[in-house]
Image: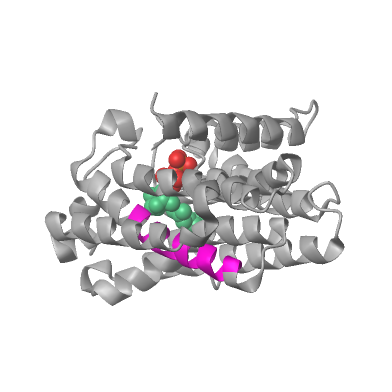
């Protein structure tokens, strides 16, 4: 295992542990929705967003027990988005992370409720004093996470994706869509880490710019993986964008230019980290990982 994979695995294990403890299985009539919440959030996944949040918070010496709780809340929102995205009314996907998607393992109504449960529980976790003793910091975290995941963020991006004839979008249209749909939660990861750590305005701005470039690079690589990736490693079918004739970075720029653009963005994102010195090495390493990832 490479050094960055080991670092990511360690934070992934910790955040999954925190999520599991926060959502213990329950007996009785409401047990099924908790089972589906656990199914849709605890298995597999790269846990990129938690890694970004914890590594950003580490820059300012924030205690890990706090940053892991905030990271768990963020990953609950990401997991809800995947559960809902897989539903027949949206992407209609049978596979997620190499396993049946939540509505295939359970049923559609349970999958909808599991997504709703993860979304709302995430804010309960953020609002708890164990996440940060200062209520102003908790409020700032909650507000930023709500903006990132709501209609001005991920939900808005998903709406554009579902309602636009994506065959007609140009490169700026694709950038705007992806900046909301995928970028907003990645941006929150670094912003949330800065809030938890009490970062100053300049440090926060640098981390947010790092995350914006990284989020776009992540999405370009996602498009490249859909076009050329290995289905077994992806844990889901590939080639779906081309099948639907979607305008993607790969289609609009061509694979070579798309790859070059992702590399430029990652270089630029790393450039934002200079002032943080050696402490930002995990953020530099994960940026390079985003280019090399195969799933
Ligand atoms: C349903 C409100 C709502 C939003 C859905 C995130 C999303 C919006 C849809 C997912 C569809 C998709 C494949 C988007 C491309 C980028 C992306 C977010 C991929 C999945 O994230 P990873 O690669 O997943 O971090 P893992 O499994 O590693 O957690």
Q: Residue at x 57, y 45 (%)?
A: 50
Which span of residues is magenta-colored?
203-218
Residue 211: say if magenta: yes
For residue 38, which quarter of the picture?
top right
Residue 283 horizontal/vertical position (percent): 48, 49
Instruction: Identify whether 23 is placed above or below 273.
Output: above
Nearer-the-camera pick, 259 or 274? 274
Split into 4 quadrants, where in the image is the N terminus?
top left
In this rendering, is residue 13 above or below 70? above
- In front here: 277 or 241? 277
Q: Is residue 87 left or right of residue 246?
A: right
Identify the image's colour scheme: rainbow, by chain, secondary structure or one colour.
one colour
Is 45 within the magenta? no
Q: Mainly helix, strand or loop, the magenta region?
A: helix
Image coordinates of residue 108 in percent, x first then y, are 54, 43
> What residue is shown at x 47% (from left), y 67% (from top)?
209
Image coordinates of residue 265 in percent, x first then y, are 32, 61
């Amino acid at each position: 295992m490479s050094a960055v994979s080991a670092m990511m695995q360690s934070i992934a294990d910790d955040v999954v542990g925190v999520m599991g403890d926060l959502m213990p299985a329950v007996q009785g009539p409401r047990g099924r929705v908790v089972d589906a919440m656990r199914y849709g959030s605890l298995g597999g996944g790269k846990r990129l967003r938690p890694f970004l949040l914890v590594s950003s918070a580490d820059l300012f010496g924030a205690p890990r027990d706090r940053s892991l709780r905030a990271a768990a809340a963020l990953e609950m929102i990401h997991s809800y988005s995947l559960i809902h995205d897989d539903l027949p009314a949206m992407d209609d996907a049978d596979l997620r992370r190499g396993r049946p998607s939540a509505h295939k393992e359970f049923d559609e109504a349970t999958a909808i409720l599991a997504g709703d449960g993860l979304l709302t529980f995430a804010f309960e976790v953020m609002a708890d004093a164990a996440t940060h003793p200062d209520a102003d910091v908790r409020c700032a975290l909650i507000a930023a996470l709500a903006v990132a995941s709501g209609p001005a963020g991920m939900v808005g991006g998903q709406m554009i994706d579902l309602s636009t004839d994506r065959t007609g979008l140009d490169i700026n249209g694709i950038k705007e869509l992806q900046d909301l749909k995928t970028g907003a939660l990645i941006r929150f990861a670094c912003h949330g880490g800065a809030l938890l750590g009490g970062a100053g305005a300049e440090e926060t701005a640098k981390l947010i710019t790092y995350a914006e470039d990284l989020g776009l690079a992540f999405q370009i690589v996602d498009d490249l993986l859909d076009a050329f990736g290995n289905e077994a490693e992806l844990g889901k079918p590939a080639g779906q964008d081309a099948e639907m004739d979607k305008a993607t970075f790969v289609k609009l720029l061509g694979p070579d230019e798309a790859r070059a653009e992702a590399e430029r963005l990652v270089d630029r994102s790393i450039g934002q980290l200079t002032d943080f010195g050696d402490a930002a090495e995990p953020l530099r390493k994960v940026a390079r990982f985003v280019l090399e990832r195969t799933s």
